[in-house]
Image (tube, rainbow, N blue to C red):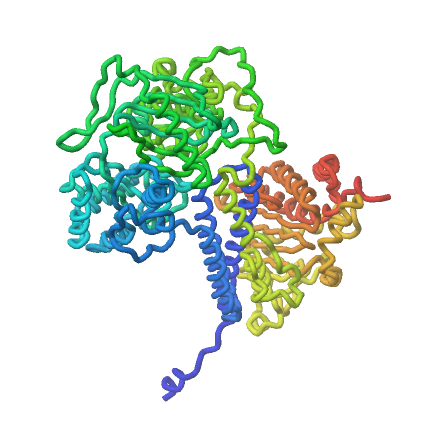
């Protein structure tokens, strides 16, 4: 009977167990809060332009912030017994808002599997991709010649991906793969491509595909990718397949080859680097009637290196344009005036020994040209004029400079094959608006190479790596200058480790150059004899602007003043980060005692983290809370120090005591004893103010107006220490400064560490930055490894003997109190240096700065 009744009686919860659970949640919340603050500081630092970043950084950062928000909200609700449930939907709303900033691809529209070219325009981009939608636009709105054809829409792609569970199998293969490992990337790519190629097309899709293709005026077809997002501000140049001179019977297999090319190693790398979801980029495909070309090429409606020059750049080769965009042969170059009669500024006729042509039986092959044809211009004056007019018309219609592929058919008609936005990574201007200065005079050292064509501007240095073929990509070391015979878009796989590129063939309009321009890798092309002139491992400086390669590191070239990108010019990632920062960093919840400090007042990620942090402190150390009131381990330190300090002892950190308050003599925790000794240093002065200028006073006053009750709350609110005999987590708020010390001290040297963090203040930005640099210098004096981001400084010291760690922790404690005096003081670098010298000379009261 007793056991039966006992089952209805809830056993009383042990307050100690509850505190241990709260401690674990609190540690998790503090950890996420610190990491979120560090990431916010890093994002703000990235906006200064001093450090490079890409779309992968944005996606990773947003996901990481979302994870930390979720962890903090979950931890806070465990701490408070679900008191803040309204934070869960708020957390989702903030995450969704950030995700919207990262949207790359619109939802797949409900359309037929096939759309004929005559039914396409820019409004159909989400269904047919930019490449095919633009071709339809060019035909309808401009009346220019384009091939006849149709688009296999993203609805067809969705149908194919759903067939036999193909999408799920691809997602499963990608889920746990480490795509940063080149070997794994190659293996996963092979597996997925094999999976795509071996999956049959749905019967209804294959039937309509054959019937529509048979209605075209020729049975020879070009099959091209037209992915949604391709040919926008993300070029995807050379990443997806193009198949030429395909028969109708081979069309289903060709379609699958194009879809499979989305999963080549270089395409997967590019997708991740540019921030696209690997399973979210919808692949539409264009099927176009094949017209054997007499000549083909690429043209830019403006010079990407000098857009103010008012010139159209035209490259041309004999036969199909694939040899131009792949850089197989050096093309003819025509630089044409945009205005007036389009006068020819420059004409460089290259030696073009081979051409790519269509074979009657299908497919394409290379043919060798006679010496007379190899050296003959590909274009007449009339064709140059016509191409220039077409380039200008396309630029005007699409509203931005264009990168255009074209062909001249056997009737002499110019056919537009594609038109996409031209990436002008060289739209450079000084912030003052002045023109870019000429290259500096050549240094004394003679160049190893003094010819070639600048493809991507800039200068870089590194060891030479001769790349004989694509299979050796994984051997390219970090910081290499890659030298190769023929350009390959597969270099995108290692573009993040390449300092510069030199190719013996290629052109400024080939696929590799377009990708290198996106990654801002200085590139020289058409550098004949580069492989013979440069030795593997040789340290060289590549000056693409001057088309020179020098031995060694030539600092005069590397240190030339570099121009900056003005707003709106090739800085889509920067602008996107700026929008994200607007939703992340601003802090609206200022005063924890104010009426607006509530869950409903959280408008940014920073607001949410601040709210969670403050309420977590309340949940941990509110002496009126039932669980803490009943717990023997939650106590207040009775001290004459100007801190409101609460202690949670999780094991032998305090001597036995019988009340809710303890004295310093009761502390047994080694790290906590060291910290208290630092706060009690006889040279430290807690009261009074150091000398300040009027500007500093106004800055502090403006930042503390909202907190009129600060004086009554000692130094700004509760501080807390979570301790054991060897462990300390001390989290304090001294005024408007947040300090954190986390330490473990023992006789085992490998276990010992101290981490330190300091952030905030009421002073202006320049004074907070001086304090960060001051802290950095002092911590480095103490042997810490230090990182600085904005007004956040973090340091770590580990694996030192216990006695040394105790002395260091005592100094770190003193340092926190020392730095809170400096809001008004750091008016200049001279004063900051005086403060540094004062600390080094143990003038901890800063008597040198105090008024007489």
Relative to 841, 221 lies left or right: left
Q: Nearer the viewer, residue 153 or 462?
A: 153
Q: Residue at x 66, y 48 (%)?
A: 816
Q: Residue at x 80, y 45 (%)?
A: 694
Relative to 151, 388 lies left or right: right
Q: Quadrant location of the C terminus?
A: top right
Percent x, y for residue 602? 57, 62
Q: Nearer the viewer, residue 638 or 757?
A: 757
In the displayed orientation, state which residue is furthest to the bottom.
1
- In the displayed structure, 602 sits above or below 224; it is below
In the displayed orientation, state which residue is furthest to the right.
852
Percent x, y for residue 360? 14, 30
Q: Residue at x 48, y 54 (%)?
A: 98
Relative to 56, 378 lies left or right: left
Percent x, y for residue 80? 53, 69
Q: Nearer the viewer, residue 65 or 532?
A: 532
Q: Quadrant location of the N terminus?
A: bottom left
Relative to 733, 712 lies left or right: right
**Is residue 634 something that shows in the picture?**
no
Percent x, y for residue 418? 34, 37
Numbered circles on residues, count: 0
**Is residue 348 something that shows in the picture?**
yes
Q: Quadrant of residue 315?
A: top left
Q: Nearer the viewer, residue 266 or 186?
A: 266
- In the displayed structure, 553 sits above or below 824; it is above
């Amino acid at each position: 009977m007793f056991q039966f009744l006992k089952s209805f009686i809830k056993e009383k919860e042990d307050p100690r167990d509850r505190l241990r659970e709260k401690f674990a949640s609190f540690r998790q919340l503090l950890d996420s809060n610190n990491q979120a603050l560090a990431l916010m500081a890093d994002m703000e630092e990235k906006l200064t332009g001093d450090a490079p970043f890409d779309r992968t950084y944005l996606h990773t950062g947003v996901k990481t912030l979302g994870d930390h928000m979720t962890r903090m909200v979950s931890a806070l609700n465990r701490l408070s017994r679900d008191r803040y449930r309204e934070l869960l939907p708020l957390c989702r709303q903030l995450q969704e808002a950030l995700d919207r900033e990262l949207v790359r691809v619109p939802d797949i529209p409900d359309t037929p599997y096939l759309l004929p070219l005559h039914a396409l325009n820019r409004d159909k981009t989400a269904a047919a991709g930019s490449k095919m939608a633009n071709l339809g636009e060019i035909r309808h709105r401009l009346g220019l010649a384009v091939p006849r054809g149709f688009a296999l829409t993203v609805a067809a792609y969705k149908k194919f991906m759903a067939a036999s569970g193909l999408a799920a199998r691809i997602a499963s293969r990608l889920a746990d793969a480490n795509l940063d490992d080149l070997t794994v990337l190659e293996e996963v790519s092979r597996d997925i491509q094999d999976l795509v190629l071996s999956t049959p097309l749905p019967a209804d899709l294959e039937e309509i595909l054959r019937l529509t293709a048979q209605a075209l005026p020729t049975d020879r077809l070009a099959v091209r990718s037209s992915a949604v997002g391709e040919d926008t501000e993300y070029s995807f140049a050379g990443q997806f397949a193009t198949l030429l001179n395909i028969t109708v019977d081979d069309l289903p297999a060709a379609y699958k080859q194009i879809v499979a090319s989305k999963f080549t190693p270089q395409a997967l790398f590019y997708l991740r680097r540019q921030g696209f979801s690997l399973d979210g980029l919808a692949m539409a495909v264009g099927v176009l009637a094949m017209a054997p070309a007499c000549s083909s090429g690429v043209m830019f409606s403006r010079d990407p290196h000098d857009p103010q020059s008012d010139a159209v750049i035209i490259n041309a080769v004999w036969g199909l344009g694939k040899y131009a965009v792949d850089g197989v042969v050096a093309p003819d170059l025509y630089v044409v005036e945009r205005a007036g009669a389009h006068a020819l500024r420059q004409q460089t006729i290259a030696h073009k020994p081979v051409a790519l042509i269509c074979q009657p039986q299908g497919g394409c092959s290379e043919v060798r040209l006679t010496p007379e044809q190899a050296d003959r211009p590909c274009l007449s004056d009339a064709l140059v004029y016509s191409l220039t007019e077409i380039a200008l018309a396309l630029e005007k219609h699409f509203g931005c400079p264009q990168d255009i592929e074209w062909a001249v058919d056997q009737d002499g008609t110019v056919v537009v094959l594609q038109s996409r936005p031209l990436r002008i990574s060289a739209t450079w201007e000084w912030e003052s608006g002045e023109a870019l200065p000429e290259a500096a005079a050549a240094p004394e050292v003679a160049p190893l190479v003094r010819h070639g064509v600048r493809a991507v501007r800039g200068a870089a240095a590194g060891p030479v790596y001769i790349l004989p073929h694509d299979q050796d990509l994984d051997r390219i070391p970090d910081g290499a200058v890659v030298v190769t015979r023929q350009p390959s878009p597969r270099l995108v796989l290692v573009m993040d480790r390449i300092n510069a590129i030199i190719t013996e063939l290629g052109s400024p309009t080939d696929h590799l150059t377009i990708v290198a321009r996106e990654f801002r890798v200085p590139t020289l092309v058409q550098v004949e004899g580069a492989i013979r002139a440069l030795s593997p491992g040789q340290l060289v400086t590549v000056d693409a602007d001057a088309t020179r390669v020098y031995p060694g590191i030539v600092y005069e070239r590397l240190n030339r003043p570099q121009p900056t990108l003005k707003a709106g010019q090739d800085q889509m990632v920067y602008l996107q980060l700026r929008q994200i920062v607007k939703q992340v960093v601003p802090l609206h919840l200022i005063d924890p005692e104010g009426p607006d400090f509530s869950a409903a007042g959280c408008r940014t990620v920073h607001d949410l983290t601040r709210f969670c942090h403050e309420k977590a402190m309340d949940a941990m150390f509110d002496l009126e809370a039932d669980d803490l009131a009943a717990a023997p381990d939650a106590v207040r330190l009775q001290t004459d120090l100007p801190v409101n300090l609460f202690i949670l002892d999780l094991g032998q950190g305090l001597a036995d005591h019988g009340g809710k308050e303890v004295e310093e003599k009761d502390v047994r925790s080694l790290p906590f004893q060291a910290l208290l000794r630092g706060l009690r240093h006889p040279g430290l002065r807690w009261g009074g103010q150091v000398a300040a200028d009027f500007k500093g006073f106004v800055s502090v006053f403006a930042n503390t107006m909202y907190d009129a009750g600060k004086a009554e709350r000692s130094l700004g609110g509760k501080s807390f220490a979570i301790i054991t005999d060897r462990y300390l987590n001390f989290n304090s708020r001294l005024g408007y400064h947040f300090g954190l010390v986390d330490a473990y001290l023992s006789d085992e040297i490998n276990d010992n560490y101290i981490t330190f963090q300091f952030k905030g203040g009421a002073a202006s930005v320049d004074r907070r930055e001086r304090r960060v640099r001051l802290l950095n210098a002092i911590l480095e004096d103490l042997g810490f490894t230090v990182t600085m981001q904005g007004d956040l400084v973090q340091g770590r010291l580990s694996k030192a003997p216990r006695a040394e760690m105790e002395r260091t922790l005592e100094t770190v404690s003193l340092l926190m109190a020392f730095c809170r005096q400096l809001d008004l003081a750091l008016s200049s670098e001279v004063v900051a240096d005086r403060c540094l010298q004062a600390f080094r000379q143990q003038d901890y009261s800063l008597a040198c700065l105090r008024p007489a």
